[in-house]
Image (cartoon, helix red, strand yellow):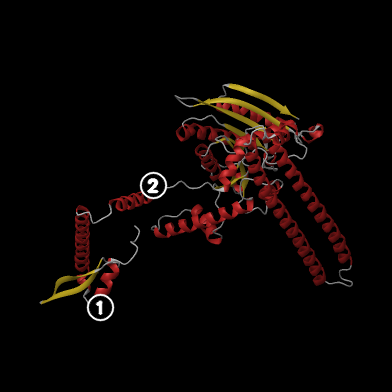
Amino acid sequence: MKKNKGKISTTEKEFTFEFRAGKQHYVLTVPLQFPVQENTSDLLGRLKLLHKLPCFVENDLKTALCRFIERETILDYDREAETLLQKLTTKDLDMDRLTDSWAKVYSESTLEHARPEEPSREEDFADVYHELIHSPASDTLLNLEHNYFLSISELISERDMELKKLQERQAVEMDSVMQELGKTLSDQDVNAVASQHFDGQQVLESKWANELKQVTTIQKQEYQEWVLKLHQDLQTPNNSTINEEIKVKPSQLSEASAQMFEEQQLEESFTIHLGAQLKTMHNLRLLRADVLDFCKHRRHGSGGAKLRRLQTALSLYSTSLCGLVLLVDNRVNSYSGIKRDFATVSKECTDFHFPWLEEQLEVVQQVVLYARAQRNSKQREQPEGPKNGGSDDNTKNLERNTSNILPGEFYITRQSNLSEVHIVFHLCVDDNVRSGNITARDPAIMGLRNILKVCCTHDITTITVPLLLVHDMSEEMTIPWCLKRAELVFKCVKGFMMEMVSWDGGISRTVQFLVPQSISEEMFYQLSNMLPQIFRVSSTLTLTSKR
């Protein structure tokens, strides 16, 4: 409630409280200013301190004080209302001014009369882009994005070449130093040279990182301004300049030499119907490819690559998003393993719609820290009960580093600069997924269930899942191991898809099961024979083998 502007009229009233202490009878009389601006508890504490009241009268005093303040406040409001009504009947008040003030207060305090929020620049850009990408200007937008991608690729090539030359020069220098070790140079000299080499690499990498960030920032600003200007120009009828640019500009995404860049890929697709009473049709695909192939852009893209990129752009602001499950460790960063490779791919093309990957990971890190603090505070409030070994290990790990996530937990990043993906689910897994004894209650499996639930609630209709819960093969992953793991994931995903009916009402979705590129063709076809048996496939959509 807003306070009235101007001077507030006050009145003084006496509060009387009687109590007995033994055989003595006491009466407390205190003047109070109305309207009372102080908190009742604060006022009660001041009275006890000033008048040295015994503690056993605190509850009675508080009850009497609250009743007195409430009663006298209501009486003051009633008297003020009576006075205003009398002025109204005697026409001492301006009716028009009074009704205007009442209407203003009502409109300011009622949600349905609130002014709509002004759209931000990001919202305007999203609406404009969605309209342009579904217009004849789509080819122009894709060509411009590809030009930006080529400029970033050239910059990255220059960076890699300069880093390679520096490493070669440092390797030669280190060889000469090692030859003099024990003769004219000591171990301390070798360590000093190694430290100097490390500092030199760090300085060069930092220089190129800053330059890439500056270039992508400029590209993003130029692209957004150009899209807004293009939309504004298209609103002008008979704008021949823009129309000619859209129609005549040749596509730079298709070249005859693109066939040599095609990846070896095996794929089989099926149609299934799941559900007890109301059956829903879903599409299943089994693919052999690298997980980052769904993210990479090709410098010399084929017609198929252009169509995939166009489809990704068309569905960017839609209810048919594409997701990808990426298996990561428990640290929220982009410094090692598959996370580093994904970050490298993400930097190859400027994201014109969402924050950079590092900015999104910083937000995720803050959310993780806040969630851990909330969880730890709730655990401290709960009484101690029987403990099991697994929870103790998790608790110890969290106490060591509260910024880490647990196996089965995942965080989400949004990208518009990837080839075929809008949403990336970074699912945390541990070394246990490489063993052959995981069950349907394993954290990785439960993480897949939660990811599918998020897909149902956030319009993600295509999701790519690593079938074997690994991105690369190792020696212990034999044929029996692969068959057992695939059977477990197939059956669990089938059960989760049956649950989707209660989550989203039965919407058709596409689930892509991805196996590593290094798996043999024989193993791939064994898995493709297992899939229809488990899902009871009703029909086969396509059977393609790209080699």
- Residue with the mark numbered 2: 111
Q: Is residue 377 above or below residue 497?
A: below
Residue at 66%, 36% in the rendered image: 515
On the rendered structure, is 107 left or right of 236? Answer: left
- Which of 84 and 467 lies nearest the eye of the viewer? 84
Q: Please name the amino acid that badge 2 sits on.
A: Leu
Mark 1 crowdedness (10 Å alpha carbons): few <14, some 14-19, many ≥20: few
Residue 50 badge: 1
x, y percent for residue 54: 21, 75
- Which of 256 and 277 lies nearest the eye of the viewer? 256
Q: Is residue 403 above or below residue 415?
A: below
Q: CA distance from mark 2 to mark 1?
A: 46 Å
- Which of 517 and 403 lies nearest the eye of the viewer? 403
The image quadrant where one finds the N terminus is: bottom left
On the rendered structure, is 149 left or right of 513? Answer: right
Mark earlier in primary sequence (2, 1):
1
Q: Does the image show residue 416?
A: no
